[in-house]
Amino acid sequence: MTLRKVYANLIFDRKKTRGVHAMSTTKNQKKTIEESLSDLEKLVAELENGELELDQALKKFEQGVKLSRECQKTLAETEMKIKILMEDELKATDEQLK
C-alpha cells in the first residue's frame, strides 16, 4: 500500500473518530492520534513538495510508514474498546428489557 493510500485511509478514519483522544496503551507512544496524524500530514506535504533529496525523502517515507502503523494500531485498539463497551451496554439493555 502506498503512503498516499495509507494517508487517505487515516484521514477517513480520523474523520470518523474526530474528538476522540485515543491513546495507545504502550509507554513508548505519548502523542495523541491527532498529533500523529498532523505529523503524518506534514510528512506527506514534504514528500509531495518534491524538493527533498532521495535519502531525505526515504527517511521521511520511513517516518510516515511508522506513524501510519502507530495510528492504525491506535485506531484498532480504540475500535476494540468501543465494541467491548457497546457490547456490555447492549447486554445490560437486553437484560433490562426482559
Image (cartoon, rainbow, N blue to C red):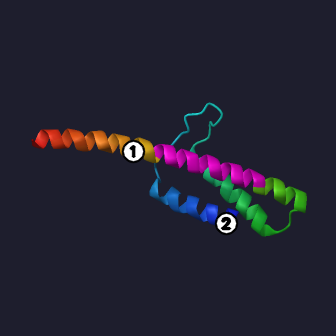
The location of residue 1, given as percent across then percent down, is 66, 63
Residue lying at 32% horizontally and 44% vertically, measured from the top left: 86
Q: Which residue is mark 2?
A: 4
**Left or right: residue 9 compared with residue 1:** left
State left or right for residue 11 relative to residue 89: right
Relative to 26, say whether 62 is above or below: below
Residue 76 appears in the rendering? yes
- Judging by the rendered image, the residue that carries numbered circle 1 is 82
Q: For numbered disc 1, what is the local secondary structure? A: helix
Is the C-beta separation of discs 1 and 2 under 8 Å? Answer: no
| Residue 38 percent location from the top left of the image | 63, 53
Q: Based on the displayed image, in which of its 4 quarters is residue 8 positioned?
A: bottom right
Counting the numbered discs, the total is 2
**Res 34 visible:** no
Q: Is residue 46 magenta?
A: no
Q: Which residues are magenta?
A: 62-78
Please tell me in which quadrant of the rendered image residue 87 appears.
top left
Left or right position of 2 against 77: right
For residue 49, which quarter of the picture? Answer: bottom right
Crowdedness of circle 1 by 10 Å Cα count: few (<14), some, many (20+)?
few
Marks 1 and 2 sit apart, C-alpha to C-alpha, by 28 Å
